[in-house]
Image: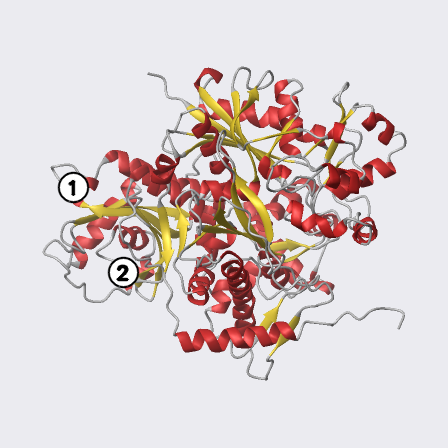
Amino acid sequence: MTERYVIAIDQGTTSTRCIVFDRRGRLHAVAQQEHHQHYPRPGWVEHDAMEIWHHVRKTAAAALQSAGITLDQVAALGITNQRETTVLWDRHTGRPVARAIVWQDTRTDSLVTALASAPGADRIPGRSGLPLATYFSAPRIRWLLDHTPGLRARALAGDILFGTMETWLIWNLTGGLHVTDVTNASRTLLMDLRSLSWDPDLSAFFGIPAEMLPEIRPSVGVLGTCTEVFEGVPIAAALGDQQAALFGQTCFTPGEAKCTYGTGSFLLLNTGLSPVASTHGLLSTVAYQLSGQAPVYALEGSIAITGSLVQWFRDQLGLITTAPEIETLARTVTDNGGCYIVPAFSGLYAPHWRSEARGVIVGLTSYITKGHLARAVLEATGWQTREVVDAMNADSGLALRTLKVDGGMTSDNLLMQFVADVLDVPVVRPMVAETVSLGAAYAAGLAVGYWPDLAALRELWHRAGQWLPDMSPSLRTAEYSNWQRAVAHTFDWIQPSGG
Amino acid sequence: MGKSVCMPGPVQSIERAAAMLRLLATSPGRRLGIVEIARSLDLAKGTAHGIMRTLQRVGFVAQDADGKYLLGDALLHLGTSHLDVNELRSRAINWADPLAARSGEAVRIGTVADGRVLVVHHVFRPDDTPQRLDTGALLPLHATALGKVLLAYDSSAFASLRALDAFTRRTVVSTRDLALSLRAVRAAGWASEIGELTPGEASIAAPIRDYGGLVVGAMGVSGAIERLCSASLRPDPRLVGYVRDAANAISRDLGGRS
């Protein structure tokens, strides 16, 4: 019998990858292609959606060749993507009307400020689970409609389509199917988090014609069949990247959580069958939905500066030459020497949400060496994780028992031990580091019966490493209190101008 | 370097490289453009460029924002270990996980530290049984496959070995026997240890090489003898292949030959 495989397309912020997984969930082949980052003005970040589509074609061919398989051996295709990035295109020509506006782009700053005082703005968090912020898709759609001559009329006539990246790729792969999944739709500010349908009040609030919006589908279930690139292969799953990582880490039970440690970090906690309204500055979002079943929700806490603090230490201070050397430097001392670094470089995110805060280094004495600073850099990631976990425990009423981790910073042993120490729960790393693409593959394979059920996926998850808490409760309490005092020093640094 | 040279003699490109380093070290401002370097040594620009690029690759020279060359950090730190252990872990981690998944065994990466093997990375055996992360642990050089690989390519570590402790009846305790087995390791390109540290346990390891073939670490699997070896106590060739493939992949990634 010929071996069959599942393919994941991971359309990320810097690259597009096509990965082939086997029945045991092992990575069989991978192809990757980076795309251009366009920065036309300060604060603007754009991608060329056509370039990304070409990269899907190229990486697909390369991955199939590298795996030595043919399309009839592909059981299903799963798509995962950078979230909130916004593409508008012409339904008739298939050409984007402008470059895609990327999730990091802050051009809608003043638009969002204006919208915040418009009537109806107070309803947004209750309906969508999200605060009104530049981070999400709806203000970007509005910005494009406002700034592209004639676009609104074409949109009202039904000629213009909106999509996040998975929608754009599915439309191209299927020859014109216009669909999104619940996880991506839950990041637009336009979807009712309970009914999982577009909320007419929210579209009206943002001035976005309903004709532009794709049909919302479950994340796990056949969305369509490819007529391009993977001809005949079912597209059986779509998930936003962080939700895919949660799925790849098999966090299927309420109370299970994962944290992806990259330049920033994203902690998602499965909260079960009803959305949790956060009172601690977390986002309420859809984790996934299996076709024909009720959706599973998640709380999300994002930390703006984690790995990027190490990069700052390397590039701006020049105290190390590569990121992993921070651990070597940190191990030249046994503790932080009383020094704390709070990286509020552009304010603080969850759970503080203080945009006027700026970073501090506190506790400096003549005793402090660069080793202490290196420790303080790593500890900042640990304490920021603790703050988000505390907020999640408070919002959800679930007490975290284990944290599953992935991402580049999990190779830092001192950091992972510190995270376990300050959370006082075991921290575990899975055998397959590619949790984002694995999650998309799992979801697609599950939808077509390649894997029978969630329990079978759980059995594929294996522990590659585990760090157990090893810090005295009194030290943990004292250090956390110091950290919180350090955080308080960041507040109110930027003062209102014109005074 | 496709053909072997019979007569040992000066290697012109190494002499030129040395001249370039002297030139950079003594020039005012300590940085020079490629045209100046080529002119000073009366070389074609392409020739000078090729040598500078090689020196840059090994870290002996660096390039500033204007494209001028200056002496690199690696020259300043020649006396200390040139590949940071945490850097090694970070570069190896994506190959160590698949090795554990393919082999079904625990994976460790080690380097030499104070006459022992320092475990710089450890991946659990993928069966979800309770296991303890032993990154940072020290193992004996002479009684582990990791250690034998490291000793085989590090004559000073071998020379500074003291009395060889016996951990089991099978531990090699004679320096002469160990030297013979290390010769076999160099010939084969991999090492094994069968019940020499812990009764019933075995390990298989291969070298991780940096630029120029310098061995910077060893990677291997360890587990029960009946899983790692045949009935006649020979290491399973399939596992040996997995270990060597993974170590070679890391070596290629580091810029070394595999």
Q: How is the image coloured?
A: secondary structure
Give percent across and percent down for residue B227: 20, 40
| Mark 1 burial class by Cα count in 10 Å: few <14, some 14-19, many 20+ | some
Reading the image, the residue beneath label 1 is B226
Name the N-terminal-most of marks 1 and 2: 2
| Mark 2 burial class by Cα count in 10 Å: few <14, some 14-19, many 20+ | some
Of residues B235 and A293, the one nearer the viewer is: A293
Give percent across and percent down for residue B156: 33, 61
- Under mark 2, the amino acid is Leu
Q: Work out which quarter of the rendered image holds the C terminus of chain B and state it.
A: top left
Please tell me whether mark 2 sits on a helix, a strand or a loop: strand
In the rendered image, the residue lying farthest to the left is B169
Establish if A494 lies above or below B253: below
Left or right of A255? Residue B224 is left
Q: Is residue A38 visible?
A: no
- Under mark 1, the amino acid is Glu
Q: Is residue B233 visible?
A: yes
What residue sits 33% from the left and 43% below the top? B100
The chain under label 1 reads: B
What residue sits 39% from the left and 36% below the top? A454
Reading the image, the residue beneath label 2 is B139
Of residues A246 and A33, the one nearer the viewer is: A246
What residue sits 30% from the left and 57% below the top? B132
